[in-house]
Image: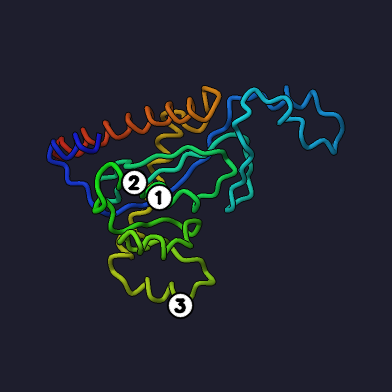
Amino acid sequence: MLDEAERLGIKISDKRNADATGLEANVDLKRCAKAKRDKNDKTYIDRNTSDPEAEFGRKESNGQGWYGYKSHANDDAETELVTAVITTGANRTDESQLIPLAGKERDHRGQDAIRKQGGDKGYVGHADELEKRNILDYTIPRNNMRTVKIKKDKNKHYLHLRNLRYKVEQKFAEVKNRHGLGKAKHRGKWRVHLRSLLIYLTVNLKRIVNLLIPKTV
């Protein structure tokens, strides 16, 4: 898909913003609860789930939990095209997939595909690993990382990438609200991943068309 976009004249930048979103498993949790032995029973879902590959996850920002999977994606900050996708259980952290996302694209498109890697505060901690790959760490530092924050706030390239983060957030809103990514229709990580790929393919095709059609006033 990215190769075809470039063939059509779309220039894909070397700037990426990573993000992740939750997918609820195609499992009837109320039905699982019927087999609950007592109020202290913590394994009733594991014993009765129709999708044993699903996991429990919890969002750090609001503590909201869900049972299912997590979709991790890297977006080109300039074209808004999704460049890499990984599906994991909901218990996997966002930061654990940052290097795999970068590696997945670089393995396909070459080592120079990514030069600047952004992400929210959940992606910090991989500066050394990114540097080894000749990628600049432009993830947003946590509040207690004052020295790093001061340094990055003086970098206009970092500020530019940070200011484009809303685009990847809008992308996730699109795939969930318009294409149903938030709820799995299949069971098993591989099937969930395949459907996710089809959804991202759809939004990429829509974006490519928008990039190719001249804007009218």
Q: Is residue 29 above or below residue 84?
A: above
> Residue pushed farthest right?
38
Q: Residue at x 24, y 53 (%)?
A: 112
| Residue that numbered label 1 is attached to | 18
Q: In terms of sequence position, does the residue under pointer 3 or pointer 1 come before the other?
A: 1
Q: Residue at x 40, y 43 (%)?
A: 73
Q: In terms of sequence position, does the residue under pointer 3 or pointer 2 come before the other?
A: 2
Mark 1 nearby-residue class (10 Å; few <14, some 14–19, many ≥20): many
Q: Residue at x 21, y 47 (%)?
A: 12
| Residue that numbered label 2 is attached to | 75
**How far separated are the C-alphas under marks 1 and 2?**
6 Å
Q: In terms of sequence position, does the residue under pointer 1 or pointer 2 come before the other?
A: 1
Q: Nearer the viewer, residue 108 or 150?
A: 108
Q: In terms of image quadrants, where is residue 138? A: bottom left
Judge left or right: residue 58 versus residue 46.
left
| Residue that numbered label 3 is attached to | 147
**How far separated are the C-alphas under marks 3 and 2?**
27 Å
**How far separated are the C-alphas under marks 3 and 1?**
23 Å
Residue type for callout 3 = Thr
Residue type for callout 1 = Ala
Q: Secondary structure at mark 3?
A: helix
Q: Are marks 1 and 2 in contact (CB under 8 Å)?
A: yes
Mark 3 nearby-residue class (10 Å; few <14, some 14–19, many ≥20): few
Q: Position of residue 30 (x, y in %)?
A: 72, 25
- Classify the position of the C terminus by image quarter: top left
Q: Residue at x 48, y 75 (%)?
A: 146
Q: Is residue 93 above or below residue 176?
A: below
Q: Secondary structure at mark 1?
A: strand
Residue type for callout 2 = Asp
